[in-house]
Amino acid sequence: MMKKITIVILLSLLLAGCFLPETIIDWVDFVKFDDTTYMSNYSKELASEQALGEVVSVVKFKLDGNITNSSYRSKNGDASYREKGTKIYEVKGAEGVYAVKDPQNKINGYQIYEENGNHRFENVEQRDIYKVEIHEMLSLGGYRFVNKLESEADIQAFLALLNDSEETLDFEPNFENRDPNYFEVLFYHDGPLVDRYTICFDGSTYYWYPFEVAVLTEEMANYMQ
């Protein structure tokens, strides 16, 4: 009798193991080739397609949806979210920087990848900025053009609002009655890349993330319509 019970228990455990849910892994967005892993940089965009160079690699395997082992070690040709066959381009004039076509999520159509990204606004070369574009992210995908600044006076006034913002670590956006509006701001200067930062509006307050969260004055509303 005990032998039968033991067999039943073992079968139950084996069957339970067969139906255990697969591990869902939240991958960091990367591509790997030439034994180097390149991470997505969401603070950069391609200035124009003219900055695209040669194809340096092609994605051979997408991890998301295919790998459930969190101990998996990435290989050359792997990408966390890019489909097999996706081309990886070098960016002219930007050593160690690469681009992948992504018209759904990027205003200028390409996601930037590099080994070490710079995400602090304080490191942006503000003196060289000759154009600022503002685009609102739409809830169903894509972007709506909002504003463009090209005169030096307008650009400097806009930058002054950003530079005067105060880091407020205890600030909590109000999500009680609505989702925030997201405005993507592109800073154009000489070179193949533009800097990109997000300004948010929760219905009463404008804020952004130059690195830590910082609150902006009400004057920012003048640029967001």
Image (tube, rainbow, N blue to C red):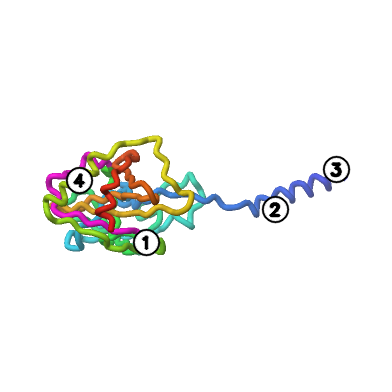
Q: Earlier in the sequence, mark 1 or mark 2?
A: 2
Magenta segment: 120-138
**SS for callout 4:** helix
Circle 4 crowding by C-alpha within 10 Å: few under 14, some 14–19, many from 20: some
Mark 1 residue type: Leu
Q: Earlier in the sequence, mark 3 or mark 4?
A: 3
Q: CA distance from mark 2 to mark 3?
A: 20 Å
Circle 1 crowding by C-alpha within 10 Å: few under 14, some 14–19, many from 20: few
Q: Residue at the location (15% across, 47% down)?
A: 156
Q: CA distance from mark 4 to mark 1?
A: 24 Å
Question: Is there any visible trace of residue 48 in the rendered image?
Answer: yes
Residue for badge 3: 2
CB atoms of marks 2 and 3 within 8 Å: no
Residue for badge 1: 138
In this picture, residue 12 sits left or right of residue 174? right
Circle 2 crowding by C-alpha within 10 Å: few under 14, some 14–19, many from 20: few
134 is within the stretch colored magenta:
yes
> Based on the displayed image, in which of its 4 quarters is residue 57 positioned?
bottom left
Question: Is there any visible trace of residue 93 in the rendered image?
Answer: no
